[in-house]
Amino acid sequence: MGKDSKSKKSSKKKAPKYIGLDKKGNPPEFPYVRTSTSAIHNNGLFAAQDIPEEEYVIQYLGELIKKKTATARANDQHDRSLVEDVGAVYIFELDDKTDIDGNFEWNIARLANHSCSPNCEAQNVDGEIWLVALRDIKEGEEITFDYGYALEHWKDHPCLCGSDNCVGHIVRKEDWDKLKKLKKRQKKKRA
């Protein structure tokens, strides 16, 4: 048997799987939101009309990827953000095995900024991530949610939300007390 007749494993990559796009690859319309310049960070999402509490505001769209791929892409996106003035990472955890890479222009939900006093929360609804209104939101208000970052990298994520209860860093709410203690200890060390 010659070399050419040996069976070869297929080296074809699977086609990317996108969440939230129609059959033609177009994103849906989200009438509750518009994009604009944000006082929090670069661009943001804003209420295009009044939004009632508990309303589904916008879906987080993107490519479904495995955790290993997500880690590599997150590192690449973070490194790029250090050089360019762009958002750092647009990877959203979906479940234990899969994430959504939302780093696409057609995913305007990626522009929703963090706030320590958010008006929306991210919810996993049947395998889709939606921003859902926590309260009534007035037309023109910026759409925000708690990014829920872990405490371990708090220094890498300063918060610019400007809310009355801002803790100064993007850290999930259940870690706020720990963050305050860490900052207090560091302040004592410097003194």
Image (cartoon, helix red, strand yellow):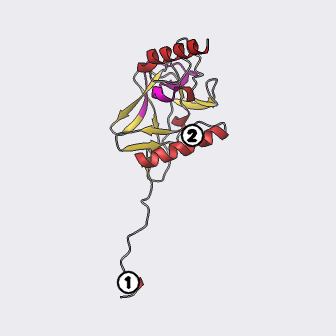
- Residue kind at label 2, given as amino acid type: His
Residue 96 against residue 22 in the figure, above or below: above
The stretch in magenta equals: 130-154
Q: Nearer the viewer, residue 52 or 102?
A: 102
- On the question of residue 46 being in view, the answer is no
The answer to whether 183 is drawn above or below residue 10 in the figure is: above
Query: Which label's residue is closer to the chain start, 2 or 1?
Result: 1
Type of amino acid under label 1: Ser
| Residue farthest toward the right in the current orientation of the protein | 84
Q: Which residue is mark 2?
A: 78
- Horizontal arrangement in the rendering, residue 29 relative to residue 42 (left or right): left
Question: In the rendered view, would you say 17 is above or below 114?
Answer: below
Q: Quadrant of residue 97?
A: top left
Residue in the image at 45% along x and 54% along y: 16
- Residue topped by disc 1: 5
At label 2, counting other C-alpha atoms closer than 10 Å, the crowd grade (few under 14, some 14-19, many 20 or more) is some
Q: Considering only vertical position in the picture, is 81 above or below 65?
A: above
Question: Residue at the location (61% across, 43% down)?
Answer: 80
Instruction: Tell whether position 132 is magenta.
Output: yes
Task: Find out whether residue 139 is within the magenta segment.
Answer: yes
- The picture places residue 191, in percent across and down from the top left corner, at 61, 11
User: Toward the viewer: 107 or 189?
Assistant: 189
In what element is the residue under mark 2? Answer: helix
| Furthest residue toward bottom | 1
